[in-house]
């Protein structure tokens, strides 16, 4: 059974561990690199967990997925989904959808009108997944910050008060 819950300060080590596993597994999917994240000091991880909405997927006492909600740098009334990753053994079992649902709930509770994210070109599985969850391409494209030779596309989902 998978449990999704928002990380608290004392779980920074768990957040760090899953983030580093994500970057090791899919280095071309994120806006940062494994080396950069490994260099973040412990107090930096505590700050990250306490200033952003880190949702962890737990299978027993092991973290198997992560999704993070932050303020959106492009839209004041939107929030941004970053750092989304589920370990391979739990892909396709509903964990990813539940993580996104947790971030959607956080964004809505935080007063956001929309939730946005970026998807790397060529990650068709992720794009289809986000399509199914109601995200739509915005037409905005740009280089992946960790590798400017790779392009990514912005997707956005409008959040309504009725929960859709």
Image (cartoon, rainbow, N blue to C red):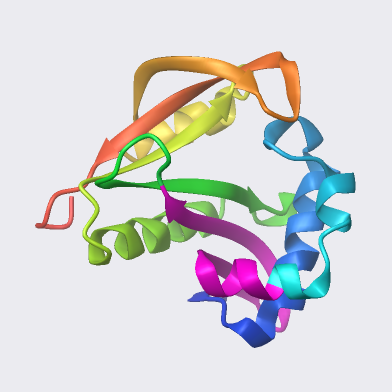
Quadrant into which the N terminus falls:
bottom right
Say which of 41 and 66 sits in front.
41
Residue that appears at 81% across and 40% down: 33
Name the spot of residue 106 as percent of width and height, x first.
Answer: 34, 64
Is 64 included in the stretch rendered in magenta? yes
Q: Quadrant of residue 103?
A: bottom left
Q: Quadrant of residue 12?
A: bottom right
Residue that appears at 67% across and 81% down: 11
Q: Is residue 77 above or below residue 47?
A: above
Report whether 21 appears left or right of 131: right
Name the spot of residue 29 as percent of width and height, x first.
Answer: 69, 33
Residue that appears at 64% across and 50% down: 85
Say which of 59 and 138 sits in front.
138
Q: Residue at the far left: name it.
A: 162
> In this picture, which residue range is highlighted in magenta?
46-71
Residue that appears at 47% across and 47% down: 81
Say which of 40 and 124 sits in front.
40
Q: Is residue 82 above or below residue 16?
A: above
Q: Is residue 62 above or below residue 111?
A: below
Report whether 42 appears left or right of 58: right
The answer to whether residue 158 shows anywhere in this view is: yes
Report whether 105 appears left or right of 58: left
Name the spot of residue 119 as percent of width and height, x first.
Answer: 54, 28
Q: Is residue 21 above or below residue 59?
A: above
Name the spot of residue 2 as percent of width and height, x first.
Answer: 56, 72
The answer to whether residue 57 shows anywhere in this view is: no
Numbered label tally: 0
> Which SS does the magenta portion mostly show?
strand
């Amino acid at each position: 059974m998978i449990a999704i819950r928002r990380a608290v300060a004392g779980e920074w080590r768990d957040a760090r561990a899953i983030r580093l596993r994500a970057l090791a597994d899919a280095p071309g999917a994120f806006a940062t690199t494994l080396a950069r994240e490994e260099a973040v000091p412990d107090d930096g991880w505590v700050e990250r967990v306490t200033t952003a909405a880190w949702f962890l997927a737990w299978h027993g006492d092991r973290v198997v997925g992560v999704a993070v909600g932050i303020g959106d740098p492009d839209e004041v009334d939107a929030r941004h989904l970053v750092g989304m990753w589920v370990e391979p053994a739990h892909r396709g079992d509903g964990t990813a959808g539940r993580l996104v649902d947790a971030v959607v709930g956080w964004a809505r509770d935080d007063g956001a009108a929309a939730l946005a994210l970026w998807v790397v070109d060529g990650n068709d599985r992720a794009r289809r997944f986000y399509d199914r969850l109601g995200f739509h391409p915005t037409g905005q494209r740009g280089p992946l910050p960790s590798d400017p030779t790779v392009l990514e596309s912005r997707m956005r989902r409008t959040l309504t008060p009725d929960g859709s």
